[in-house]
Amino acid sequence: MLFAMRKMAGWSSHRLQGSTLVFLYLILNALAARTKGPGHTHLNSIRIDGDISLGGLFPVHSRGHEGKACGELKKEKGIHRLEAMLFALDRINNDHELLPNITLGARILDTCSRDTHALEQSLTFVQALIEKDSTDVKCQGGGSPIITKPERVVGVIGASSSSVSIMVANILRLFKLWLLYPWLYLFNHGSIVGPGGFTPGFLVNLGPLGQLA
């Protein structure tokens, strides 16, 4: 769990030091933080720079109640899956023979176990594809504006439940982005298989029935 925590809330590129308890306190507060203001939702996210970036959608939190988008942390179905992706990225990036001279990056978001929230978060992945060029933007003083350009992702891993994944895949495929669905339990938690085969926009990793791949 600490492996995943050290990359959360914008600290992915830095080695954090300090006691485990202090770090745990800071990261849980960062995960729970939400920017207040009309029309704006804070994205609980991990961002890792790389030559090629992958998106990730995981139910790090449960559904929120009383108007809140997110609830309590989900360890098994949320943090563990998030950590699995981070572990895989580290292994790949540390293997110089697998992808020589290429570093994989990531932008991982929290679905909060809610399909509508996941759909809103998934728009982050297509932002770089639809955002207009801002090279002609100038500040009043004549200087160049400080703009953080959204990173382009080549695909998205997630999003745990089939209902959430189908909604997200339907959006991503409009922009020719694939959703990799690494766990599939067709009978226990719904299915992404229809009369004509798999839902368009999916790349599926099939594992043993009822077991996460």
Image: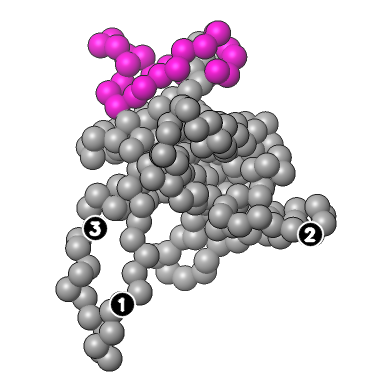
Is there a contact, CB below 8 Å, between mark 3 and mark 1? no
Q: Nearer the viewer, mark 3 or mark 1?
A: 1
Marks 2 and 3 sit apart, C-alpha to C-alpha, by: 39 Å
Residue 28 rendering spot, x and y as whole percentages: 69, 54
Task: From the image, tell me which residue sits under label 2.
Answer: 18
**Chain-order first, disc 3 or disc 1:** 3
Q: What secondary structure do most residues of the magenta stretch adopt?
A: loop
* Residue kind at label 3, given as amino acid type: Glu
As helix, strand or loop, the secondary structure at mark 3 comes to loop
Placement of the N terminus among the 4 image quadrants: top right
Task: From the image, tell me which residue sits under label 1.
Answer: 145
Left or right placement of residue 65 versus residue 206 in this view: right
Q: Residue 9: which quarter of the image?
A: bottom right
* Residue kind at label 1, given as amino acid type: Pro
Residue 4 rendering spot, x and y as whole percentages: 64, 43
As helix, strand or loop, the secondary structure at mark 2 comes to loop
Q: Is residue 183 above or below residue 153?
A: above
Marks 2 and 1 sit apart, C-alpha to C-alpha, by: 36 Å
- The range drawn in magenta is 189-213
Identified at 31% across, 77% down, the residue is 145
Residue 117 rendering spot, x and y as whole percentages: 45, 46
Identified at 45% across, 40% down, the residue is 104
Task: From the image, tell me which residue sits under label 3.
Answer: 131
